[in-house]
Image (spheres, coloured by chain):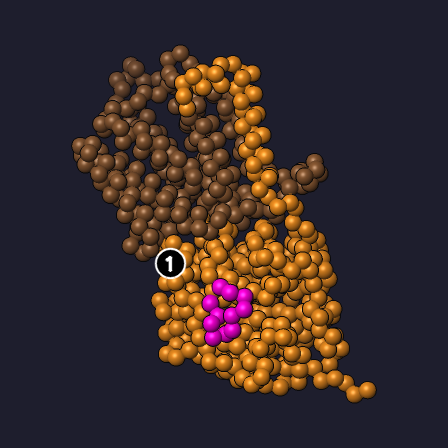
Amino acid sequence: MDLNAFLNTLWSAGTPVLPNPAAMRVALHGVWAIVLGSGALLLAYKLARPYRLGLSFLLMSWTLVPGSASPAYWLGLAFQTPSLTSAVICLGWFLSHARREPGIAVPMANGQINALKILAGMGVVLGWVLLLDTLALLPVSVYAWGFSSAAFGAVTVLATLLWLVWGTAGADRRAPGLVGPLLILCVLTLFVLTRLPTGNVWDALIDPWLWVALQMGWLISVARRLLAGKHLPPATRA
Amino acid sequence: MPDSLIAVVTRSFSTRLLFGLLICAALMGLDVGRRSGVTPLAQAVWPTVEKAAAVSPLLPVGRGHIPMPANTPAAHASSLLAMPAAHPSALLAFWFAGTRESAADVQIAASQFDRATQQWSAARFVVNRDAMGEQLGFGVRRLGNPVAWLDPRGKIHLFVVATGLGGWAASRIVHLSQSHEDQDFAALSFDVVRVLPLSWLWNTSFLVRTAPLALADGGMVLPVHFELGIKYPVALRFDANGEFKGMVRISSRKHLLQPTLLMVSESHWLALLRDQRPDGKVAVAQTLDNGQHWVDLPDLALDNPDSSVAGLVLAPGRLFLAHNSSPHSRTALDLSASVDGRTWALAQGLAHGAGSDEYSYPALAWVDDSLWVSYTDQRQRIAWQRFSFPTSAP
């Protein structure tokens, strides 16, 4: 491929690569199994570890059953396949929490928390842009651009920039700031290899439920901050 | 990631830069490498219709109803597919049928017009939602609006509306293709290819209704529309193998749906659209650059009672449009003709009723030197009519 052809391919939204239909069917069940299994582990936090894990694996196994007996069959009817970001977050959360008792939190460095907050903010903005685009309220078609190499490239460059800014190894924590860039790079790598869930990079990065969850998380943190401020003695309030 | 590797790649800005650039280049290389190169410009192709090129009046040569499958009192939204001259059938018709629209038992029915007997065959179901759900891996609540396309290898593709959680506004478009290319009608069956990825919002609210525009490369442009709250039309590009090649919004207006595409030249196309507003007219959008960009044009003079239209171009200056011509009901269905796609004149009345009569959702096709029209009759049956162009005396 010469440079001209490369650049044309890069900018064109008319060369989508869609996922293999068989892989889409497997991913539908696999990703919902991860999401539901993680959800079960989260909701069953009061149970002892073996019971929590058992419940989680049971739900995962049920979701992996092919056909209409599986929850994935009905969740897919309504919501299709969750994004790769949801899948990676849930899998990471599942793996880290499956190994320890509930209530034992792994502390994060302030820099890492701030980096994740910025990433979450980017996700919220991206979701709004995609929602407005779906309702044809933007002058350009952002979703259609998500099939192009240029959109994929833009996200890759952004992840690289985040890596440059946040990817420093501090003395107090193992890898502060790495989580965000690694999450995006992991999602992009999975996407470029599988094209899941739809062949559109925006669908790989964020789904509507993840977008809602990010905003709920933000609202809860704001509410907590406000409540904490109210309960402080007058002398300590700003 | 092992601690030692993390320590190495995060040691300094320059190592991070190097590592980041390497990953960036690798991912971009993998992405571009998997793409098949730039899709060529979409050139619309004239149908080879010499007989229709001569301006002559339409002569009705046949009409009737397409047989319905047993125990299906409701039928709607037919689509006609012209078959090649060597094929035993001249036409295939697809529509949805069941006990009522949106019922769980609605399936996609099909019938063929046999060249030897000059009769429509008994109808049979070719797509049902349970089988579709099994192949997709997820459920489908209801089926509707089939649109058929024949690829250059002779394989039939069906694009079908399949709803998720909700009514028609929760629809998705499912692409199916013929299971085997050499099937006769009695064995005609379809396999799911995929749900077309058209929207971020759980891929909902895109519907298909009207026939595709054929392209010189063997591919086609499939007109579809979005209808969750607002309505807007979109053109989808497919290559000769039926592979999805992208999407372009047709209009910036928010009340237009079910576009039908008419070529004026290889690069100049019109989209004629159903208008959802009361007192609406048939709306128009135009592209002058092979469908890359579209602009809205002033509405046509034709009334549109929020009803689907179907257009067909036979030759340069020979455009036809089947449409409901009364302003507030679907009691009158007419066929109009035009030279430029902007000014239309009545060519033939198709069906005129009264009161709550409904003749709607027309489809057009050209085959065996005849113009064929199918449409929904009272939401109960699919009616058809056939017209020819008599050759003028020497």
Name the quadrant containing residue A227.
top left
Of residues B45 and B86, the one drawn nearer to the viewer in this rendering: B86
Q: Colour of chain A?
A: brown
Residue B385 colored in magenta in the image: no
- Toward the top, the furthest residue is A171
* Chain identity of mark 1: B
Q: Mark 1 belongs to which amino acid?
A: Glu
Instruction: Tell me the quarter of the image containing the C terminus of chain B.
Output: bottom right
Task: Residue B107: tell me if it is visible.
Answer: yes
The residue depicted at 47 percent of the width and 55 percent of the height is B195
Q: Nearer the viewer, residue B243 or A126?
A: B243
Query: Could you say where residue A66 lies in the image, as x and y percent from the top left?
Result: 33, 52
- Left of B28 or right of it: where is A99? left
Residue B389 at what x, y percent from top left?
70, 82
Up the image or down, A117 lies above or below B385; here it is above
Where residue B30 appears, as percent x and y from the top left, is: 56, 36
Q: Is residue A106 left or right of residue B63?
A: left
Q: What's the residue at 53%, 49% (across, down)?
A: A136
Against B70, residue B258 (above or below) is above
- In the depicted structure, whether residue A203 falls above or below residue B44: above
Residue B64 percent across, percent down from the top left: 53, 84
Q: Nearer the viewer, residue B248 or B46?
A: B46
Quick check: can you spot residue B365? no
User: Circle 1 sits in a helix, a strand or a loop, which is it?
Assistant: helix
Residue underneath mark 1: B134
Classified by dominant secondary structure, the portion drawn in magenta counts as loop
Q: Colour of chain B?
A: orange
The magenta stretch spans which residues?
A: B179-189
What residue lies at 65% left-to-right and 78% top-to-bottom? B368
